[in-house]
């Protein structure tokens, strides 16, 4: 045999048509941080979706109401209840379209949809018709009151009634004259008010009991000149606030917000994907959080892309290894269909609604299939400078034998960073064959550089780590 070279297969390179180098991100695969076979991590198929139940339409929001001990969703134009067997029942009508906000209190579940507000007390669904409610676009619950924004002002229900708005208890976010787009209570029991290009933090005064006064005051010195692109382009995970947004003088990106600071977690490649969207398209973006198997994920849901950020990987290896593209097809680029994941503690399952039809799906780590259908997984390598050599063999560390069906991988090479040649089929796994090796031989001659693409379309999850090439 000849010389050996170890090549990572978690992040690839490509040459772009605008004379630039771009990243080739993982597709439908995630990085896992673990020392194994001399490497510090490996890639794993993203969990699949198994049918859990049938709802009433396209999903518009979900919540597990810990007070009512109930899994609730806005499905189509209906508020539905989802039980632990996947059976659903319609509670009432929530007209409108698009994402909803679902705060809840000790007494009720709130629903903000298309400028209207409903309360569900576990038995009855009631629309709040107070004339001072206006047309709210977002809400959260804090210290006994529902806290709203209508895009301009901030206001809240009264301490005495969740259906009443004090007509004099209004305020504005005044750090910057931009529009207010959303609100979110953080772990410090503060209300975070998100504007288009700025963010402010508010705290309960604690001494306001009379009518006619707004109960909250801004926290001086904690504002930041970075806002969100749309009402639902924010989420909280592990006590940190993640947003899709930007300062007025910069393009949109993904950030972590802390009092007075913003930390960007998007890579240059992620920023370029986001730059494909105009302002009105970005306004419908949704961020979701999921913590599973000690992995901490942020899902950035755009109209044509679903991007997955792995915070644990970013902390260990850096943000460039933390991003994945999730999709739902084989040959195209259809974004991952699951949306609005809810962890239901009654059965310890992550349940998702759907962006294509009325299905409810269980996130299933025993399969990579989506509702029984195969999807495409892709891994790439960086461009490897190898001058005037023959590729004798490549071997990838894998975990074979556990898949019910045989799993093949289609390996192809690129000599220009743009196009890939004919695919070579290599078997990755065969049932009960735990000693099967992932090896491809006699791959050809390299003039000056080469990169590799690994494509899997199969019934079965795979774990792949380091690749070693033998050349002479």
Image (cartoon, grey):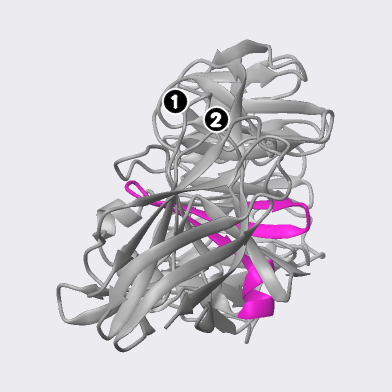
Residue 422 visible at all:
yes
Taking the magenta stretch, the answer to whether it contains residue 301 is yes
Please provide percent x and percent y for residue 426.
47, 49
Residue at the image point whose x is 55% and y is 17% from the top: 55
Please provide percent x and percent y for residue 150.
45, 49
Residue at the image point whose x is 43% and y is 71% from the top: 392
Please provide percent x and percent y for residue 352.
59, 33
Q: Quadrant of the C terminus?
A: bottom left
Q: Is residue 409 above or below residue 407?
A: below
Residue segment shown in magenta: 289-317
Q: CA distance from mark 2 to mark 1?
A: 7 Å
Nearer to the camera, 336 or 301: 336
Q: Secondary structure at mark 2?
A: strand
Please provide percent x and percent y for residue 161.
73, 36
Q: Are marks 2 and 1 in contact (CB under 8 Å)?
A: yes
Q: Dot 1, crowdedness within 10 Å: few (<14), some or many (≥20)?
A: many
Q: Earlier in the sequence, mark 2 or mark 1?
A: 1
Query: How many badges with numbers are in the image?
Result: 2
Q: Which mark is residue 353?
A: 2
């Amino acid at each position: 045999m000849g010389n050996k070279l170890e090549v990572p297969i978690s992040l690839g390179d490509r040459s772009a048509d605008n004379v630039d180098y771009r990243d080739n991100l993982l597709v439908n695969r995630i990085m896992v941080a673990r020392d194994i076979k001399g490497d510090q991590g490996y890639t794993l198929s993203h969990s699949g979706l198994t049918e859990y139940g049938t709802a009433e339409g396209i999903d518009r929001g979900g919540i597990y109401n810990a007070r009512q001990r109930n899994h609730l969703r806005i499905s189509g134009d209906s508020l539905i209840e989802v039980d632990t067997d996947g059976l659903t029942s319609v509670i009432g009508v929530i007209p409108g379209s698009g994402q909803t906000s679902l705060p809840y209190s000790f007494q009720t579940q709130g629903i903000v949809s298309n400028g209207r507000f409903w309360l569900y007390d576990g038995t009855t669904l009631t629309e709040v018709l107070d004339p001072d409610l206006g047309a709210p676009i977002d809400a959260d619950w804090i210290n006994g009151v529902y806290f709203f924004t209508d895009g301009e002002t901030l206001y809240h229900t009264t301490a005495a009634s969740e259906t009443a708005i004090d007509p004099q208890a209004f305020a504005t976010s005044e750090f910057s004259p931009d529009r207010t787009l959303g609100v979110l209570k953080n772990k410090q029991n503060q209300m975070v008010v998100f504007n288009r290009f700025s963010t402010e933090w508010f705290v309960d005064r604690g001494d306001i009991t009379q009518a006619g006064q707004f109960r909250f005051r801004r926290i001086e010195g904690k504002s930041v000149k970075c806002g969100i692109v749309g009402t639902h382009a924010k989420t909280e995970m592990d006590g940190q606030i993640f947003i899709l947004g930007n300062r007025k003088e910069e393009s949109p990106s993904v950030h972590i917000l802390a009092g007075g600071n913003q930390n960007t977690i998007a890579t240059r490649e992620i920023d370029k994907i986001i730059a494909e969207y105009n302002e009105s398209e970005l306004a419908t973006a949704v961020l979701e959080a999921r913590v599973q198997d000690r992995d901490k994920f942020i899902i950035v849901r755009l109209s044509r892309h679903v991007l997955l950020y792995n915070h644990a990987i970013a902390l260990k290896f850096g943000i460039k290894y933390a991003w994945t593209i999730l999709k739902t097809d084989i040959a195209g680029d259809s974004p991952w269909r699951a949306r609005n994941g809810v962890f239901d503690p009654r059965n310890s399952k992550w349940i998702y609604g759907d962006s294509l039809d009325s299905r409810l799906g269980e996130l299933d780590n025993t399969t990579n299939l989506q509702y029984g259908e195969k999807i495409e997984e892709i891994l790439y390598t960086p461009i490897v400078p190898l001058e005037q050599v023959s590729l004798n063999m490549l071997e990838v560390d894998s975990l074979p034998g556990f898949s019910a069906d045989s799993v093949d991988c289609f390996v192809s090479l690129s000599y220009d960073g743009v196009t890939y040649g004919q695919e070579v089929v290599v078997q990755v796994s065969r049932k009960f064959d735990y000693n099967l090796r992932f090896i491809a031989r006699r791959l050809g001659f390299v003039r000056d550089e080469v990169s590799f693409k690994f494509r899997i379309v199969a019934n079965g999850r795979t774990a792949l780590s380091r690749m070693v090439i033998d050349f002479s």
